[in-house]
Amino acid sequence: MSKVISVAEVKHHLFDGMSIMSGGFMGIGSAETLVQTILEAGTKDITLIRSDTALIDTGVGPLIANNRIKKVIASHIG
């Protein structure tokens, strides 16, 4: 069974109040397509678990800038 799913399938797994753990550092290695999909789906009140918050326009930054994140668990804010 493949563990790779399409963007359309991802949308069915998104819901308000969910927790997401994301890789990368300062935007490098971030799941850009996932971030864009979350923005398009309107998902909000997310708990983000990550090493950092990236930059406003990079990595998970757009989720923060668009008020989609309720709580951040991180070791570096920058």
Image: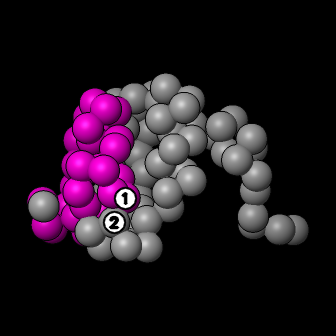
**Disc marking residue 27:** 2
- Amino acid under disc 2: Gly
Residue placed most toward the observer, 57 or 25: 57
The quadrant in which residue 45 appears is: top left
Separation of disc 2 and disc 1 at Cα?
4 Å
Does the segment drawn in magenta span residue 52? yes
Identify the mark nearer the N-term, 2 or 1.
Answer: 2
Range of magenta residues: 50-77
Pointer 1: residues within 10 angstroms few (<14), some, or many (20+)?
Answer: many
Asked if disc 2 and disc 1 are in contact, CB closer than 8 Å, the reply is: yes
Q: Residue at x 28, y 30 (%)?
A: 67
Q: SS at mark 1?
A: loop
**Disc marking residue 59:** 1
Instruction: Say which quadrant the C terminus sits in.
Output: bottom left
Query: Does residue 76 lie above or below 20 as drawn?
Result: below
**Disc marking residue 7:** none
